[in-house]
Amino acid sequence: MAVPQTKQTTTEARLAGAAVPVGAGWITSARETALTRVRAMGLPERRDEYWKFTRPDSLTTPEAPQAAVYDGSDEPEMFGNLDRLKIVFVDGVFDPEASDDLALEGINVERLNDAAQRDIHWAKDLYGSLEERGQTPVPRPLASLNTALATDGLLIHVTGRASKPVNLIYIHKSETSDALLHHVVKLDAGAELTVLENGPAAARFNKVMEVDVGDRATFHHVRTQGRDHERRAATHVFARLASESVFKSFTMTANGVMTRNECVIELTGDDATAHVAGAAMGDGDFHQDDTVFITHDAERCESRQVFKKVLRNGATGVFQGKILVKPGAQKTDGYQISQSLLLDDDSEFLAKPELEIYADDVACSHGSTSGAIDEDALYYLRARGIPKPIATDLLTLSFLAEAVEEIEDESLRDEITTRLEAWLGRRRG
Amino acid sequence: MLEIKNLHVDLEEEGKTILKGVDLTVEAGRVHAIMGPNGSGKSTLSYVLSGRDGYEVTEGSATLDGVNLLDLEPEERAAAGLFLAFQYPVEIPGVGNMTFMRTAVNAQRKARGEEEMSAADFLKAVREKAKTLQIDADMLKRPVNVGFSGGEKKRNEILQMAMLAPKMCILDETDSGLDVDAMKLVADGVNALRDEGRGFLVITHYQRLLDHIKPDVVHIMSNGRIIKTGGPELALEVEQSGYADLKSEVA
C-alpha cells in the first residue's frame, strides 16, 4: 500500500539531512534496510489505528521539542543500594568517565560504535532483525528509524550468569537533546542477566532494546522513567524467547509529558515464560502509553501482562495489549490485566485489550477496569487517624502493588516500593 | 466522656430516618453495651460517631470530653481519642499491616502535637501487644487483613486499638463470625485495655460476648432509640425472652 502524501512529508522532513552512520558492511546493510522500512511504512500519524489514543506528532518532528532539565539531585540515587555495573549515557551519548569498567564476569559488553567498525561480529544476525520481525502484523516505524540512525548503545553478550546487574543510567542535560540508543542483548543457553534502566535520557528519547533469550536463559528487566516532567520518549523492547527461557520486564513511569513504551515478545520455544508489568503515576499533562504485543508460537508457554495506572488532574493513560496465539501453540497460558485508578473526573484511561487465538487448547484471559478510590477503605484508614491525603497515597500504593509484585527480586521490589512512596509523598507537597 | 444527646440521623441517599433521638452517656472507666435486633440502628450509631460518609445528622449532638465530634473529619475524631473496631474490617492489599499501624499511630501523635514514635519503639510495642493477642510475625508482615480469617481480622482490630490507646472504644459486633475460642481471645484483649480513663461501648446482637466482656450498663436499642437501660441482668433477660417482649413492654 502506498504511503499517504502527508505521511511521506512528515517522514521526509524527519529524515532530511539524516545519513546512515558509517560502519562495517553488516551494520550498514542493516541500517539501510531499516531506512527503507521507515520510508515504506512512513512515520506514525494520528490517523493510524495503532496511534488512536496517543498523538505521535511530538515524536516525529524533525527537531525534539524543548524540555527543561529536571533537578532530581535531592533524591537518593536510583538503585544506589545495589551492587551493579553502572553504564552512563548523557543525552544519549556513552560517558566512559562516569561509567564503570565494562568488564564483568559472565558477560561481554561493547559499545555499538566500536562493534559497528568490526567486520565480523555476533550482533550481525541480531541488530535490527528482532526489530524487523516485530514489524508484522503491526508496523512500528519509530523503531526502524532507531535501527537506521542510532550510533550509540550497547551490545551485550551473556555467556554465563552475570555476577551483578547491569544498570543503564540515562542522564538528561541539554534542553534540546534528541537521543537515539539501540541495545542488543544476546543470552546464550542457560545464561542469566538483569538489566536496570533509569533516568530521563534526553528531551526526546527513542530507544530500542533487542533481546534474544536462548534456551533456559533468564532475562530480568526493571526500569524507571521518572519525574522529569517535560521529557518525551518512545521506547521499544523486542524479545525472542527460546525454549524454557524466562523474560520478565517491569517499568515504573512517573510524570513525563509523552511516553510510549512498546514491548513486542515472540515466544518461539516451548515452555517459555514472558511477564511484562507496569506501574504508572500521572499528574496533570501526563500522557503514558503501554503497547504490548505477545505472540505465542510454541507449546506450553506462559505470558502475563499486568498494568496499573494512577491518574489525576487530567492525566491520560493508555494500554493496548494483545495476545496472539498462533496455530499449534497448544496449552498456551495467557493472562492480561490493565487497570486504572482515576483520582478525579478529569483524568482518562483508554484501553484496548485484544486476544487473537488460532489454537484450540489454550487458556487466555484478559480484563480491564477503571475505578475511583475505594470509599470503604478510605474511611477505614481515616477512622484510624490517617489524614485523607496520606490515606489516598496508601491506597494508591495498594493499587499499584499488584504490578510491583511482578518484580521477582525482593531487593529490587523494595527499592521500587520505597521510590513509589517517596514520589507519592513528594507529589503531595 | 462520650455524651450523645437527642441524636437524629437520616440515611443521605434514601432520606430514611435511622436514629430517632438517641440519648446516651458513657463515663470514663465504664463499659456500656448496646443490644438490639437487626436494623435497630446500632451500627449506624457507630458509623455516625466515627464519621462515615452517607449519613446526615438532623438533630442532636455527640461530644467526646466536650469536643463536638460531629464537626470533625474521621481522622480528627480518631486523634481526639475515638476508636471504632469494625464489624467488617477492610482488606487493603499491598499495604503492610505494620506500615498501616505505624502510619496511624504517628498521624494521631502528630495531630495531637506529640512526638512521633521511632521505628524501634513501635516495633517493640507492637510485638509485645501482638503476642498477648496471639498475632504472629507473619500476620504483622502481611498486607492489612488480606487472607486473614474472621477471627484474625477481629484480633487485628483489637491490636490496633491497643496500639492507638484511645479514650473511647466502640466495638461494633466484634463477636460476629467468631467461634467461642476466638471470642475469648478477643475479649481478653479488650479486658486488658479496661482502664479508669477509658470508656467502652460494646455493640452486640447476642448476650454471649457480654459473658466475657462484663458490662456495667446495658442499653436496649430498637427502631432508632434506646428503649431500656439497666444492669448486666438486662442482657440475660434478652437472652431468655428475646427482643419482642421488650418491645411490646415498652410500647
Image: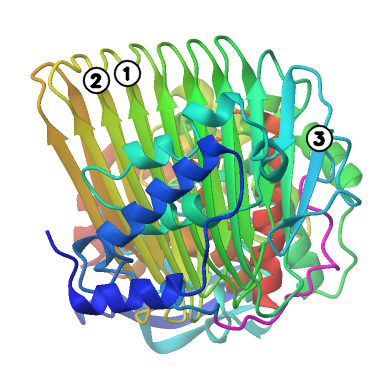
Q: Which mark is residue A332?
A: 2
Q: Amino acid at mark 1?
A: Cys
The residue under the point 32% across, 52% down is: A37
Where is residue A238 drawn, in percent x and y?
43, 39
Q: Up-down: is B158 above or below A200?
A: above
Q: Which mark is residue A229?
A: none
Q: CA distance from mark 1 to mark 3?
A: 31 Å
**Does residue A385 appear anywhere in the picture?**
no
Q: Are the residues at dot 2 and dot 3 in contact (C-beta closer than 8 Å)? A: no
**Does residue A316 appear anywhere in the picture?**
yes
The residue under the point 41% across, 27% down is: A240
Q: The disc numbered 1 marks a residue on which chain?
A: A
Seen from the viewer's position, the closer of residues B135 and A393 is A393
Mark whose residue sits in front, 2 or 3: 3
Q: Amino acid at mark 3?
A: Arg
Q: What stretch of residues is rendered in magenta? A: A65-79
Q: Which mark is residue A301?
A: 1
Secondary structure state at the residue bearing disc 3: loop
Q: Are the residues at dot 2 and dot 1 in contact (C-beta closer than 8 Å)? A: yes
Where is residue A147 drawn, in percent x and y?
48, 49
Q: Which of pointers 2 and 3 lies earlier in the amino acid sequence?
A: 3
Seen from the viewer's position, the closer of residues B219 and A382 is A382
Quadrant containing the N terminus of chain B is bottom right
Residue on which the image places disc 3: A84
The residue under the point 33% across, 11% down is: A270
Where is residue A46 drawn, in percent x and y?
26, 74
**Main SS type for the magenta part?**
loop
Q: The disc numbered 3 marks a residue on which chain?
A: A
Secondary structure state at the residue bearing disc 2: loop
Q: Amino acid at mark 2?
A: Thr
